[in-house]
Amino acid sequence: MHTRTLLAASLSLLATAAVAQTQYAWVGTYNPNGEGLYRFTVDPQTGALGNKTLVSKLPNAAQLTVSHDGSTLYLASEVEKGVVQALRVDKNGELHLLNQVASGGAGPVYLSLTPNGRYLLVANYVSGSIAVLPVQSDGSLGEATDVQQDKGEPGAAKPEAAVEGSFAISDHNGPHAHMIAADPGGKFVYSTDLGLDRIYQYRLDDRTGKLTPNDPPFISASSKGAGPRHFVFTPKGDGLWLINEEASTLTWYALDAANGTLKAGKTISALPQGYKGTSFAAGLVLSQDGEQLYVANRLHNSIAHFTVKADGTLIHKDDVWTRGDYPRSLTLDKNGQWLYVMNQRSDNITRFRVTSGGMLRFEPDYTPVGSPSQMVISITP
C-alpha cells in the first residue's frame, strides 16, 4: 500500500511538472496585414494555438529565432536599415527589450544561432550581406564582429530546371543573401545567395566571431537560375538538403567534416510529378530523427512530404494541400507531433498532425493572423 502511495505521488508530481511548462508560439508577420510580432499559447495535448496577443509593433517583424533555453527571443525588422532586437522572455510570456543593434545590412531575412549560442548569424536579403552578432552573457547583442558582402555576376533570369510553363523568376539582379547557418559542429558557416545562384562556405573562429572564406569560398547552385533559398542539416551533420526557390528543386550536398566544404549530389523536384506552371519553393523542415522531410510550395500551395532512406536518398511520399495560400514557412513542434504552416496570402496558420510514417493529417482549426512569415516555439518552465 505504501509503495502504491509513493507511485501515485510520483506520477502526480510528473503531471504537475508537465503542466507547469508553458509552450509559447511566436509568429512574425509582414505589414500591413500583420501588425508585428504575435504570441500564442500552445495546447500541449492538441497543439492548438490560443490567446493571440500582439506583443511588438516592430515594422515587418518577420524573422525570428529563440535561444536554446527559451529565455531570449531575437527579432529582426525586415526593412531597408535592418535592425535586430534581443528580448527577454519572462515565465508569463511577457517580453522585455534588452537592446537593439544594426543587422549589418538591409532587409534582414534570416536569423540563426550557432550551436553553442555565442553568436547570432544574420542574412540580409536587400543588401546581399551576412553578419555575425555576438551574444552577451545576459542574452543581449553586441555590434557585428564580422560583415561579409556577397559580390559577383547575377544568376540566370530564368530557372533552367523549372517545370514546363514556369515563370518563377525573382531577383536575379544582384546579391540577395537568403539564409545563413552554422553546421551542427559549429565550425563552419554556410549562406545562400538567391540572386547570384551561390552557396557560400566559411570557417568560423568561435573566439573572435570572424568568418574566413573556405576553399573554394562558394559553389554554384545545382542549375542556372535555381535560386538557392533555405537548407537543413542532417542530424549527423554529414550533409544538408537545400531548396531552390525558382527551380522548385531539392539538392543534396555532402559535407566534408574535415574541411567544411560541400559537394553537390542528386537533385529532385519538390513538386508532384506532372505539375506544369509556376511555383516558388519556400521553407523546409526535417524531423529530429532525420527520417521525414517537408517542403512548402507556394502557388501550388502544398507540403511535399519526403521520407529519408538509410542511404540518404529521398522518397516522395505525398503532397498535402496547406488549406491556405502561399505557404512561406513550416514549423515542427518540439516533439514532432504537429506541423504548422504560415500561409502568407490567406492570412492564417494551418496545423497538421504528424501520424505514422510521418504522414500529415489536417486539423480543421484555422488560426487567423495577418501575413504570417515565421513561427518559433519556446518552452518556459
Image (cartoon, rainbow, N blue to C red):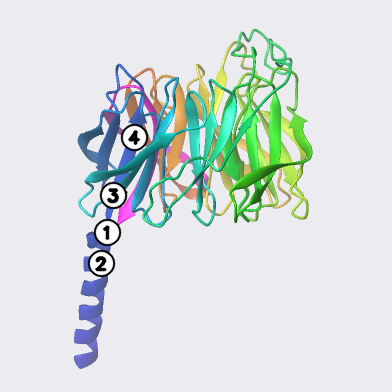
> Residue visible at 33% across and 24% down?
59
Q: What residue type is labelled 3?
A: Val
Q: Is residue 335 above or below residue 227?
A: below
Q: In which quarter of the image is residue 58?
A: top left
Q: Is residue 207 above or below residue 123?
A: below
Front residue of 315/95: it is: 95
Closest to the observer, 279 or 60: 60
- Tag 2: Cα neighbours inside 10 Å, few (<14), some, or many (≥20)? few
Q: Dot 3: what SS?
A: strand
- In contact (CB < 8 Å): disc 4 and disc 1: no
**Secondary structure mainly formed by the magenta segment:** strand
Q: Distance between the residues labelled 2 and 1?
A: 7 Å
- Label 4 and label 2: CA atoms lie apart by 26 Å
N-terminal of the two: label 3 or label 1? Answer: 1
The dot on residue 21 is 1
Q: Earlier in the sequence, mark 4 or mark 1?
A: 1
Q: Earlier in the sequence, mark 3 or mark 4?
A: 4
- Determine which quarter of the picture holds residue 281: top right
User: Where is residue 364 drawn, in percent x and y?
Assistant: 30, 32
Judging by the rendered image, the residue that carries numbered circle 2 is 17
The magenta segment: 358-381
Q: Nearer the viewer, mark 3 or mark 4?
A: 3
Residue 191 included in the magenta stretch of the image:
no
Q: Which amino acid does label 4 sit on?
A: Val
* Residue wearing tag 4: 27
Within 10 angstroms of label 4, few (less than 14), some, or many (20 or more) residues? many
In the image, residue 31 sits, relative to residue 46, either above or below, namely: above
**Residue at mark 4 to residue at mark 1: CA–CA distance:** 19 Å
Q: Mark 3 points at which residue?
A: 89
Between discs 4 and 2, the one toward the N terminus: 2
Look at label 1 and name its amino acid: Gln
Cα separation, mark 3 vs mark 4, equals 14 Å
